[in-house]
Amino acid sequence: MSEGRSCPLAYRYRPEVLCQQATAVSEDVLYIVGGLYGNPYALDEIERMVRAEERLGHRVRLVFNGDFNWFNASDPLFREINSRVLDHTVSLGNVEYELANPSPETGCGCAYPDFVDQGVVERSNRIMARLQEVADRHPDVQNRLSLLPRYLCLIFGGLKILVLHGDPESLAGWGFAHESFSATNELAVHGWLGSTGADIIACTHTCLPVLWSGQVQDRPRTVVNNGSAGMGNLRADPRGLITRIGLTSPADESVAGSECQGAHVSLLPVAFDSEAWLARFDELWPTGSDAAESYRQRILHGTSLDPARLIFASVS
């Protein structure tokens, strides 16, 4: 496999071990933030959303499940993003893994499947190489990243919440990609939920959002992929998305939501200052740069995905 389409063995794990050790959390709400991609304005907005929840009397735990670095390819922004994020509950994405533990011939570590264009893969490898040069100037941050777990299992409201970056077999797995659900990946989804014992699996990595609900072993289960917190996810919509899991329903608008054994699972929009972020992005990644070629149109306009197409339900 070529760089960017493969991943090291260290990315792999077995579904049945992922919830063997779980951490109880006492908060009323989890905000699970995947794919911040180095966007400080999205982080500003997420922190504002937390404060709004707190004014309602909700205690919120911020959980970052990887790829909070990507576009932040300058020394000040690299330090800012990591210092702010690492104060919270955090697990690795492939980006952070490759910043802390570069793997020969792995490239970006994205493990892109065949349906992703080779040009995207090559540009991602070069973005990673540039970001690694920045990270090398911050060994203290690299050390903190190297200590992060690859996944988290949290006990929340009596439920097991499995927080991943990719899927239950790999840090960079695409088993919960929107494209996989479009191909009706039912057997794998049921198998992973059964093997892990998780009630809710929250992931990211694959850049498009998913909300799946179904019965597995006679109880409701949910899989939620927030797509990206730091970029647009939906048609003509530049807002990011995060996963909210709460003992109460969200006070503000959600793009999609479901209930799982008494927990409310929602995809909340992150309405960051897109003009300020685009100006900052253009300074770091001007016209013709790899990130501009791959991502600028998405930052401006979102994707081609309609909200109704991110919701899936079990057919069995």
Image: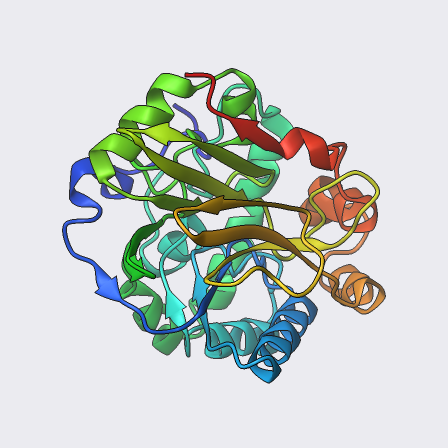
Q: Position of residue 226 (x, y in %)?
A: 55, 47
The image quarter in which residue 197 lies: top left
Q: Is residue 201 above or below residue 146?
A: above
Instruction: Give the residue drawn at x 39%, y 47%.
Output: 261
Q: Is residue 94 above or below residue 134?
A: above
Q: Is residue 14 in sight in this rendering?
A: no
Q: Position of residue 236 (x, y in %)?
A: 84, 42
Instruction: Give the residue drawn at x 54%, y 38%.
Output: 211
In what quadrant of the picture does the N terminus appear? Answer: top left
Q: Is residue 51 in sight in this rendering?
A: yes
Tell me how many marks there are: 0
Q: Is residue 162 left or right of residue 262?
A: left
Viewer-proximal residue among 197 and 140: 197
Viewer-proximal residue among 25 and 183: 25
Q: Is residue 22 left or right of residue 4?
A: left
In what quadrant of the picture does the C terminus appear? Answer: top left
